[in-house]
Image (cartoon, helix red, strand yellow):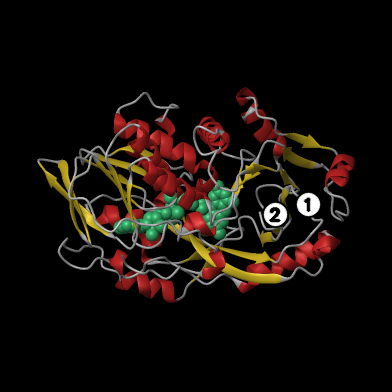
Amino acid sequence: MLNVAPPNPALQLRPITPLDKLPSDADVVVVGGGIVGVATAWHLAQRGLRVVVCEKGAISGEQSGRNWGWCRNTLRDPREIPLMKISMADWRDRDVFGKLETGFRTTGIIYLTGRRPDDDGDYDAWLQSIAAYGLDSHMLSRRQVSELLPGCRRVPQKGALYTPSDGCAEPGWAAPAIAADAQRQGASIHTHCAVRGLETQAGRISAVVTEQGEIRCGGAVLAAGSWSRLFAGNLGLGLPSLNVRGSVMYTRPMPGGPEVSVVGRRFGWRKRADGGYIISQADATIFDIVPDCFKLFGAYAPTLAKSLKQLRLRLGSRFIEELKTPGRWSLDERSPFEEVRSADPAPSAFVLSQAASNLAASFPFFKEPAIEGSWGGYIDVTPDQIPIIGRSSSIDGLVFATGFSGHGFGLGPGGGRLAADIVSGATPCTDPAAFRPARFGL
Ligand SMILES: Cc1cc2nc3c(=O)[nH]c(=O)nc-3n(C[C@H](O)[C@H](O)[C@H](O)COP(=O)(O)OP(=O)(O)OC[C@H]3O[C@@H](n4cnc5c(N)ncnc54)[C@H](O)[C@@H]3O)c2cc1C
């Protein structure tokens, strides 16, 4: 077995025991061992399919192990809410992931500010848009905010938005726990095993080619997160996705602090299972300018126009790195996926120090947090900021489960269930129309 170093010790990823020998045959191969890939595999294994997961680095080594850990309905796009409700049920259900050590717990989430740092909260419009879904999201008065968050110095005039049923899980634990349980059900999980591409016969998938050999199969699920666009490009498919960079830091255990997760003006937190806190800023993402930005400008122009204030544009080494990355390769040569086992971008010191000082000014409890470490992570975002889940219209047997646009940790269990329904031909757990790949010509 290959001895693979953890992608970043700060992530505290729980290891799984990968299998040594790659099977030569399978029903379905899942490309990518993030939360979406392993949740898909879990459901497929439960349904008796022979499923193989190939992960180029470590399970959860990229986005799924680097996020804040929030599992929320709050301020979610209404098109995603039915799937998110399924996800929340799966996080909790002891017959699904509720019995596993994912760290899931119900903590509630409070937004003290709007979706944008300079917006005091356009909550009424959002609350109206989700009225039909029966969520427990509601407004808190200023007095109620002070009761829930004693010591809060900056309570907005309008109060705050609160969803008591929202929660969190531990990014270092969740996908590895689901992967290990999928293994127990017969899934074959392989780390340090990059998929180079697909082979087709008469337009239908006949095999998946990995760096460790070929797996004959009739189906593949593309759950490669921020690499899905590159992978699809080698198949001649123009999957629209751009990667932005998030930054996170974490503290030592801080006894006596709040359980509830909070977003405030230019700060946010979540309490971890060890009693420490994740601290960051919502939507303060770094947008590295890369060649794809020019190719995809038209598709993203409406989103960019709305989010320019949150994005911090940077032109740096990433432009050259992506320029040098080959867009096409043959399946018998080393692919770009073998060059980067787990992307580990630098966090933004500016974003994190701004978050820490704003947090300290708003909450004396966080005046001197003992910071233990930090990390960065690429987040794959589609032009309409909702995922792509469904069958390819040009390659028979290929299913997309990607583009979770910065909120796929909470949504991952539902995304995996829906992808498994599509692969296995079961009745979809929710109407997949909003996620259909055909909206991007895929
Ligand atoms: C800083 C940050 C904060 C976030 N906060 C939250 C949050 O609080 N709540 C929330 O819901 N979401 C959050 N997100 C988003 C969330 O983490 C992602 O949407 C989600 O994890 C996506 O899961 P995935 O399985 O699609 O992708 P990933 O977890 O990125 O997994 C894809 C995997 O595919 C592998 N791979 C790629 N190409 C290949 C190949 N060719 N062969 C084999 N393997 C391959 C990669 O190595 C990777 O491990 C955050 C993300 C970041 C970075």
Is residue 405 in view from this perspective? no
Type of amino acid under label 2: Lys
Type of amino acid under label 1: Pro
Residue 255, percent across and down? Answer: 79, 59
Residue 148 left/right relative to 317: right
Query: Where's the C terminus, which quadrant?
Result: top left
Residue at the disc numbered 1: 258
Residue 28, percent across and down? Answer: 26, 42
At a point 39% along the width and 27% down the height, the residue shown is 428
Q: Quadrant of residue 372?
A: bottom right
Residue at the disc numbered 2: 271
Q: Quadrant of residue 279?
A: bottom right
Residue 45: numbered disc:
none
Residue 306, percent across and down? Answer: 57, 50
Is residue 173 in view from this perspective? yes
410 lies above or below 377: above
